Amino acid sequence: MPALWHQLADWSRRRKELKGDCAQLILPVPPASEKLIGHSKRLSFPCYKDENRLRDLLANEKLDSHSSFQKVNEAVHRQLFFFNEVFNYEVKTFNCFLLSASWQQAFNSPFWGAVRDITRHDEIQKIAENGRFCIQLDSTDVWNPEIYLLMDQKGADVLAAQEIYTLPQQISIYTKGYYQSDIDNMLIHLSILSQKQNKGLYQSRIGMALQVGCLPLFQDDSGYISSDGHYFDDGPVCLVINSGYVKNVSVACKNINLKFSSLELHSERDKWNILVFDAVSQQALTTLTNALPKIAQRFLIQSWMPARPRLTGGARFGQAVLLNPASTPFIRMEGANSGRFVISDSVGNELATGELSVSDEGLFISPEKLVSIHGQTLCRYLLTVDQQITPLIYDVHVLDHAPDAPYRRLKEPGNWLVDGPLGILVPLDDGARNESNSEFVNKQKLIPMGGEWSLWQQHESSPAERESTGLHSLPVALDWLTEALALRFQRRSTLPFDELDKHLIPVSRAISIPAWRLRRILFTSGFLSVAESRYTPYPLVIQTPRTISVFDEKAGAVARISGMMTKSERNQLQCVLADNEQINRWSLRGHDLAIGCIELNLSSVERAELLVEQFGLQLITKADFSVSPLGGVILPITQIENIPSLPVNINVSTWLEGKNDWSEESALIDQNSNSFVRCREKQRNRYFIITQNGYWQTDSFAWGLMVQTIFLKKTLGIQSHNGDLHWSKSLIALPLSLTQWWLHFAGGCLAIGDDGHVSFVGGGSSIWGEIDRSETTTQEYDDRAILRRSRALKLRRGR
């Protein structure tokens, strides 16, 4: 054994002299009286006593490899006389690296390697006993942030909380998750639970940070903001912080002009707050640390780490990233300004290769290069790094479509509002939202707002041919977007509009279709919906609940499904069909952005119930609608309110039709007729339509815009003799109930024209439903609850 160590020491000396990439191993000189076995042991473990002393020192000072170089160096120098000569030499070498700001050499030094090994050994022991935990934050929507506690199986067993669920895809080494929609209650519950157990989460770094009131989150290698991340200069920082500390932190940030956003969870009474900093310098991090109590500072101080690649953006499934034009992740690393990529399939065949493009967010694969590939499983990045001859290789597992996994639904749908069928917003879970104004059978004269039935210009346009296509035959842009958005909604229930744009813009670049046209087809087709919280006047994007309608035929039943379905879900849908059942999708020939329902020929109505349960579909019938899909602009059933005058002293924005945008907010002075204005209140937006004969008020933008169009232009669009409709291009949004009615009960398709107008094609039914257009006609309509009960009984017939 001694000879082996002498050979290793001699090799390290020669290597250091020749290439300089190796530290020299210095062996201690044994006393002459030492026995051979003692000599061998001393050579094998030259600093084992020093390691024990260093371990005790770090534990007493509450330091580890997460602490800064300077803190550990100062603590060791205070007790340097307790260590032997070789150890002191290593500490002095480490100190020289710090004095010369040679951070890479300091990180790779034997002394810091010993500190890292001690920390790793202690963490492994704690993990074996208590499990591994990680906190992840999704703050893409500042009004609806979400926090997840991830853990391995051991951690889940120790925590033993009822709300623990199995992750659809393992994330790193984590297989279990814990989530509550109320973040404040979740953090309070975790703190109480961990303290009661005095093990598990309580013994983890996360638990200790929560106990002292400050848990810092940084960006990890996969781009998530999590407790597994690490600080890098000018990188993002998030503080899950006790609300009592916020005032001091705010003052410190104001003094150095450091901006942050506060994710106020519910109210000032909350125990916890979340502060998000987009970019924090090393000096600013020190200022933040000093603003905290000393017991919390140790968790925010971060040691230096060497630069490494970080992947951000894109839609994720566990550690894998969806790679298509709608999901193009960015890779960035300090010192890397260019590079190449190689995309391959499962057997190693190269599918695409080329140069990485450059943007402010990092390096990325241009979406045009992802248009024609499929079956991709691996993307290799070869980054050109400053002062490095060979490129740095970074491999990422990628997907070509979204794997099947449950979607994260809104836990309190009653607190979210969407367009209803009668002109106003209604709760997302309001089962009676489609009822008419009457509880009994009524006979009333029904007329549109504006007093005329002739709201359409009669004009014969080139007939569009509706055709039956394969199940997977949908526009390629919608196919890419469906896979990307499905993965996003598997992780969170809402998306802000700027996050949606991150998927739309690269697709627009790949196929040269404006992003606003792509956005319009997503909302018009019922793939996505706009929802507003009861408590904030800011709209968010949600996945529209997928709907199914069933028609009882003599030879079986016909079902139509509308909504966003991934390739995996469509394959499952095809697999559940019996031998005598068929499936197809309706579309329009020659249109780049057109879509219709998925239509199934089933053997019986009861078969539809299986689809409802398996795919989480929402069953709808004509009874779920008003007397007309345009009920929101039909008097007297509309719930849009006619008011005698406008409120006084309000600030409003005016709709600018030419720009499809709102003007700057100002005091309402000019009340000219035929204007559409918005008043932004604390909890809700209110829209006012100012006409020659009065004022109308609603909280629905889509219905308000339609009323404005009726009074301003006296027309909603162009109608052909066969019932095809080409809506006015000024109607940039249509109520969901209207488009669902056309897809399900008219059996038609939707298309977005080059100028942005929405077309209803191939339905063969009047948009007015069964209302006669004569002024003398009265309409009789029944209580909708009775009709829904009738429908339910019909579906369960034969059980």
Image (spheres, rainbow, N blue to C red):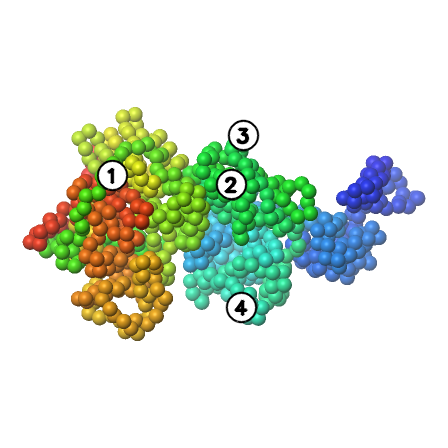
Up the image or down, 287 lies above or below 584; here it is below
Q: Residue furthest bottom?
A: 649
Closest to the camera, between mark 3 and mark 4, is 3
Which amino acid, by three-letter code, is at mark 2? Answer: Ala
Task: Residue at 37% x, 33% y: name it.
Answer: 571
The residue that disc 1 covers is: 464
Task: Residue at 18% x, 50% y: name it.
Answer: 457
Which numbered disc, 3 or 1, marks the residue that appears first in the sequence?
3
Q: Nearer the viewer, residue 555 or 613?
A: 555
Q: Which of 95 and 115 is in front in this view?
A: 95
User: Residue 143: horizontal and vertical position, in percent?
Assistant: 42, 59
The residue that disc 2 covers is: 320
Up the image or down, 16 lies above or below 60; here it is above
Closest to the camera, between mark 2 and mark 1, is 1
Q: What element carries label 2?
A: strand
Tell me: 418 left or right of 295.
left
The residue that disc 3 covers is: 349
Label 1 Cα crowd, 10 Å radius (few <14 / some 14-19 / many 20+): few
Q: Is mark 4 on a helix, strand or loop?
A: helix
User: Residue 340: horizontal and vertical position, in percent?
Assistant: 58, 41
Q: What element carries label 1?
A: loop
How far apart marks 2 and 1 lie (CA) works out to: 41 Å
